[in-house]
Amino acid sequence: AGIMSAANSSMSGSTVASVPNPGTQWNAFSSLVSVRLDKNNYLLWRSQITSVMKSQGLLRYVNGYFHAPPEYLDVDQTKPNPEYDTWERADQLALSWIMATVSETILPQLISYSSARQAWCALEQQYASQSNLRIIQLKRDLQNVKKGGMLMADYLNHVKFLYDSLAAVNHEISDSDLVLYTLNGLSSEYEAFITTVTTFKQLPSFSEIFDMLVTQENRLHILTPPSYNNSDSSTVAFVAQRGRGRVNFNYAGRSNFNYARGRGTGRNGGHNRNYN
C-alpha cells in the first residue's frame, strides 16, 4: 500500500524562527546525510536527518513544534502576514531536504504533500512498522551469520555491518555477544581456534578477534597444500596464554603473534579500527 494521508498540522499562530541560509546550510546538510531513504533503512535515515535538521534549526518544522501562522492579517485577506512568509520559506527548505534524501522509488509518493510536516508524518506512518520488522531480521541475521566461502575479512566486515546497522537504530549488541556470534559462524577448520578462545577467562574484543582471525586464515592458507583440502592437516597448533593483559599465540612453535589487552581500554580493547 502507498503512503496514507498524514494529518495536517493545526494552523495556530506561533513565533517563527528566522530562515536558515539555504546555500550555506545545504553544504552542511548534504555532507552529513550519507544515506537515501529506501524501504529497508528508515530508522538509519531518520537518525541522520533528525540530527542534521536539529543542528540547522529546521527540525521544529517537521516535528509539529512550529505551526503555520495565519497567511493574512485581516479577514479580507488583503494584508499578507510576514510571519507566514518566513515560516513558509523555512518549511519548504525542510521539505526540500527530505525529498532530496529519499530514493527515486519513494520520491513519487511525496509529491502530493505541500509541507515538511505532512511528508515527515507520511514517511513515518509508512515505514516505522516495517523498520521494526527490519530490526528483528537484522538480529536474526547476526545470530545466524555464517562465513561460508567468504574471505575472512569480508566475513568480519559483514558481521560488523550487521552490528552497526543495529547500533544505528539504538539496538546495540554487547561486544562479547558479537564475538560469540562471529565464532559461531566459522567452519570446522577453525574449531581449534574457537575452543582455545572460548576457554579464555575473558573473551577478546571484536577488534582483537578481527586481527586474530585474519592471521589464522593466512596461516591456514600457508599450511594447506593447494592440491587438496584436508582440514585436519591444516589445523594450526597453537597455545594461547593470557597473562598480565597480553594474549600470545604460538603457531607450531614458530612466530609469536601478540595482541595487547591493556587496562582501561574499553570494550574494543583500545583498537580504533576502520572495518570498511
Image (cartoon, rainbow, N blue to C red):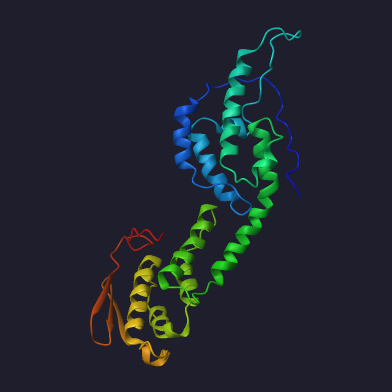
Whether residue 194 sits left or right of residue 108 in the image: it is left
Where is residue 2 drawn, in percent x and y? 74, 46
**152 lies above or below 128:** below
Where is residue 16 drawn, in percent x and y? 58, 21
Whether residue 226 sits left or right of residue 255 in the image: it is right
**261 lies above or below 149:** above
Residue depicted at 44% across the width and 35% down the height: 28
Q: From the viewer's side, name the closer residue of 198 and 150.
A: 150
Q: Quadrant of residue 82?
A: top right
Whether residue 51 sits left or right of residue 231 in the image: it is right
Where is residue 261 drawn, in percent x and y? 30, 67
Q: From the viewer's side, name the closer residue of 214 and 100.
A: 100
Whether residue 202 sits left or right of residue 64 in the image: it is left
Q: Quadrant of residue 263?
A: bottom left
Q: From the viewer's side, name the closer residue of 6 and 225.
A: 225
So how many labels did they put on this image? 0
